[in-house]
Image (cartoon, grey):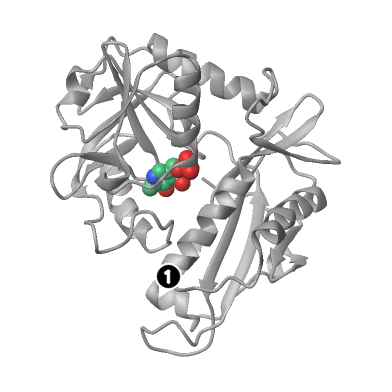
Amino acid sequence: MPLETTANIWHNGQLIPWEKAQIHVMSHVVHYGSSVFEGIRCYAQDNGAGVFRLSEHMQRLIHSAKIYRMPLPYSHEQLNDAVVELIEANGVTPCYIRPIAFRGYGEIGVNPLKSPVEVYIANFPWGKYVAGNSGADVCISSWNRLAPNTMPSLAKAGANYMNSQLIRMEADVNGYVEGIALDTNGYLSEGSGENLFLVRNGALYTTPLANSVLNGITRDSILVLARQLGIPVIEQALPRELLYICDEAFFTGTAAEVTHLRSVDRILVGDGNMGPITSALHKAFFDIVSGAAPDKYNWLTPVKVRETVTA
Ligand SMILES: Cc1ncc(COP(=O)(O)O)c(C=O)c1O
């Protein structure tokens, strides 16, 4: 997807022009993948725009940095405020927000501790991520997700996305829109950039954090909404073949939002259409982010926007 630029990028406390946000080729991150980042959406509502679960995303960034012993020189509140300041300065909604912290130009060698930590935040328009309004045709990847105690799955680290890239490229060259990886024990884990849900006999299932998944914020939102709707929720290790015989399946993620799966390995999921439980959760999610339903969980941080573009 081509990148659409905006005017400013937030760098270490200041807004700088988009084209000035550059790093040296000898920065630690370029060689050793030492970055942690976030992906956040800002949705347009009738009376303005709101950033979805901003504080939870920034908390996850802080936790990702903590796992990698990367001191962030900004507080949780300063990072939240920086996002609002940036969106208001750029005047672009709806948009996707990309905060990133990494080890910059300092020393060469694997040990990152003496390379400075740089923090940037960008925002830009970004539309639908997983193709297929009528449902996504996906495959089980031949690549496994990260093994426990190798690359920590709970850190949203740039290096983890080398694994995601393998999953996504394999799916792409084989004619699927996305791949689902198993964990190293052969249980379902997640997509290259999405958490996985399935529905069977009226209950909603998702894979637990111990199956090498990211603790997705959309995943958490769907669990909250499912409980509100009285749908039984079960977090447990799930065998691959359950995807072939479940009634409904869908991905969640900031980029993918709620995307139903039409087929897995060319086997139709249910009748291939979005099923009733996925539809109810999809509606509940989009009602909140679009402002059609009250924001009863305080998930939206308002931003004052001068101008709106359609992503
Ligand atoms: C590997 C992976 N799993 C799951 C998700 C979904 O997480 P979230 O809902 O917080 O965007 C993402 C996206 O950030 C991801 O990259």
- Whether residue 237 is visible: yes
Q: Nearer the viewer, residue 235 or 6?
A: 235
- Going by the picture, which residue comes out furthest to the right? 306
- Horizontal side of 265 relative to 88 (left or right) equals left
Q: Is residue 231 left or right of residue 2?
A: left
Q: Is residue 266 visible?
A: no
**Whole-percent x, y for residue 42 in the image:** 66, 39
- Above-or-below relation of 16 to 203: below
Three-letter amino acid code of the residue under disc 1: Tyr
Residue 290 located left or right of residue 117: right
The quarter of the picture showing ligand 1: top left
Q: Who is closer to the viewer here, 91 or 74?
A: 74
* x and y percentages locating residue 201 in the rendered image: 26, 11
Task: Please name whichever residue, 160 or 114, is drawn nearer the observer in this view of the structure.
Answer: 114
Residue pictured at 51% horizontal, 84% vertical? 115
Quadrant of the image for the C terminus? top right
The number of numbered badges drawn on the structure is: 1
- At a point 37% along the width and 11% down the height, the residue shown is 275
Task: Look at mark 1 in the image and give the residue it sits on.
Answer: 68
Residue 122, relative to residue 288: is it above or below?
A: below
When asked about the image quadrant of residue 30, the answer is bottom left
Q: Is residue 93 above or below residue 136?
A: below
Tell me what residue is drawn at x 46 percent, y 61 percent: 64
